[in-house]
Amino acid sequence: MSIYVYQTFVIKQDKFKEGIENLKEIQKFRNEQYDHTVEILSPITGADHTYGLLSKYEGLAEMELQDKKMFDDENYLKIIGDFFLKHIAEGSMHTQIFRSLHEKKNS
């Protein structure tokens, strides 16, 4: 079963351009360096500066492994640290984890 991590956050208006550039850097780094995919979601409705990341993993164990690798990586910590400290509104990060439903095969 696939695992999806859905994170939303508000990018500061006065740091919008830099925030989007930083977000693209995070996406590129994670897609190239780790065994999962990350997509940036931009708003169509709702609050204009609320963006999201959708990460897809092969399973819970893979999610845990990739997270450990990311948070042991000094280069990733620098990229993500800048994002959290400089570009998003404090307290706006919201994370949800979903899994895909397992479909039974008919005998």
Image (tube, helix red, strand yellow):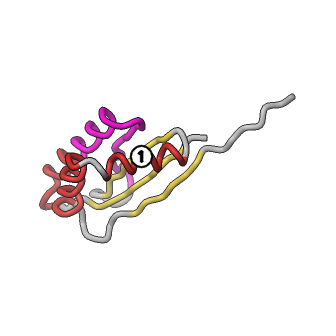
Side of 43 where 99 appears, left or right: right
Magenta span contains residue 29:
yes
At which x and y percent is residue 98? Answer: 55, 52
Part of the protein shown in magenta: 23-45
Seen at 31% across and 71% down, the residue is 91
Q: Name the residue under label 1.
A: 54
What kind of element bears circle 1? strand
Query: What is the x, y in percent for residue 50?
Result: 32, 58
Q: Which amino acid does label 1 sit on?
A: Leu
Q: Which residue is drawn at 35% across and 63% down?
A: 93
Q: Determine which quarter of the picture holds residue 84.
A: bottom left
- Left or right: 49 in relation to 65: left
Image: 46 above or below 68: below
* Front one among 46 and 5: 5
Q: Does the magenta stretch include residue 26?
A: yes
Residue at 29% across / 61% down in the picture? 10
Query: Residue, x 44% and y 46% (percent of image)?
Result: 65
